[in-house]
Every structure is written in structure tokens, then in C-alpha cells.
Image (cartoon, rainbow, N blue to C red):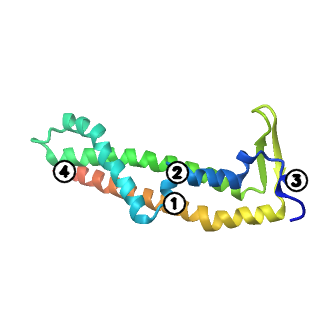
């Protein structure tokens, strides 16, 4: 590239897609999706376990543990899985936003406020760099989150099917 990147790119530093990606990758919550698979699963498992504090009393009131233990476990498991699902949705939306910003050939930015939005056409070099980051860094994260959501949806679906079978017998 001729000249410095600052001369080429008028987008404020914190609104540049590469810098937004770096900030997201370093943030406490969104970094979860970048962790090693075992650590990532442990974090989700901890959320699932701690969700029982909220969901357990509701499930126990609806299905007393002494009278309907299977329905208590199924309803609590589905409730906690829904909380984990909301967490996954938030992770996915954050990473999907960055994906869109890196993929786009134009960058929308605000110079000083919501009323003065501008659009900057990425140079071919910047576009290539951003799309490489998208392909090798962000898309694997999105795929991991989608796979996790699919597993979670399968667990909720199978629990619901088991519930339906138990209720109709």
C-alpha cells in the first residue's frame, strides 16, 4: 500500500472492521467463542448448571420432584438449555455483525454522531485482508456457534419428544 493506512481510511479507529474484530476477540464475553473446545464447553456447561438456580424452583413448583421427577428434570433441562440458547444467540449476533462488516466492500461509519453517517469504499488491499480474516478467523467461530446451537436444539427437541411420550402414556 502506498501511504499509511490512516491516510487511506477515513473511518474512525474504533469503527474500522479490523479493529472491531480485535475488540470483540478480546472482550470478556465474546472471547468465549474463540477458546479451546474443552474450555468453551466448560463455560457453556457452567452457564447451564448455574441456570438451574433460576429454573429449578420454577420446575419444582410446576412438577414436584417427589411426584414427577422425570418431568421436573426435563422441564428444568429445557429451561436451562433455553438460557444457554439465549447466550449462544448473543454470541452469534456479535460475531455475525463483525462478519458482515469484514465481508462488505463498503464501510458505513459515523464521524461524530448518528446524524453524519458516511460510507467508505474499501481499497482492494483492505478488502482482501478483511476477507482473509473473515475466512480464517470469523467463519470458523460462526460455524462452531451454529454447531453448538444445533446440538442444543437437538437436546431440547429430544427432551420435548420424551416429554410428549411420557404425557401421552
Residue 76, image x and y in percent?
26, 44
Name the residue tied to disc 4. 166
Q: Quadrant of residue 153?
A: bottom left
**Cα separation between marks 4 and 3:** 67 Å
Q: Is 77 displayed left or right of 16 in the figure?
A: left
Q: Quadrant of residue 45?
A: bottom left
Residue 127, image x and y in percent?
77, 62
Closer to viewer: mark 1 or mark 4 = 1
Name the residue tied to disc 3. 7
In this view of the protein, which residue sits in the foreground, 137 or 146? 137
Judged from the image, the secondary structure of the residue bearing numbered disc 1 is helix
Closer to viewer: mark 4 or mark 3 = 3
Nearer-N-terminus badge (3/2): 3
Judged from the image, the secondary structure of the residue bearing numbered disc 3 is helix
Name the residue rendered at 83%, 49% in the picture: 120
Q: Is residue 25 above or below residue 117?
A: below
Name the residue tied to disc 2. 30
Looking at the image, do the residues carrying marks 1 and 2 touch, with CB atoms under 8 Å apart?
Answer: yes
Amino acid at each position: 500500500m502506498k501511504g499509511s493506512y490512516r491516510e487511506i481510511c477515513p473511518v474512525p479507529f474504533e469503527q474500522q472492521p479490523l479493529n472491531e474484530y480485535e475488540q470483540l476477540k478480546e472482550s470478556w464475553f465474546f472471547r468465549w467463542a474463540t477458546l479451546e473446545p474443552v474450555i468453551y464447553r466448560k463455560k457453556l456447561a457452567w452457564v447451564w448448571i448455574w441456570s438451574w438456580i433460576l429454573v429449578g424452583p420454577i420446575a419444582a413448583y410446576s412438577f414436584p420432584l417427589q411426584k414427577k421427577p422425570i418431568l421436573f428434570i426435563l422441564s428444568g433441562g429445557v429451561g436451562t438449555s433455553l438460557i444457554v440458547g439465549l447466550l449462544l444467540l448473543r454470541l452469534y449476533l456479535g460475531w455475525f455483525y463483525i462478519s458482515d462488516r469484514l465481508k462488505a466492500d463498503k464501510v458505513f461509519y459515523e464521524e461524530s454522531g448518528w446524524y453524519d453517517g458516511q460510507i467508505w469504499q474499501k481499497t482492494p488491499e483492505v478488502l482482501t485482508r478483511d476477507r482473509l480474516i473473515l475466512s480464517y478467523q470469523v467463519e470458523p467461530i460462526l460455524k462452531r456457534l451454529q454447531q453448538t446451537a444445533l446440538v442444543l436444539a437437538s437436546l431440547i427437541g429430544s427432551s420435548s419428544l420424551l416429554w410428549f411420550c411420557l404425557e401421552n402414556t
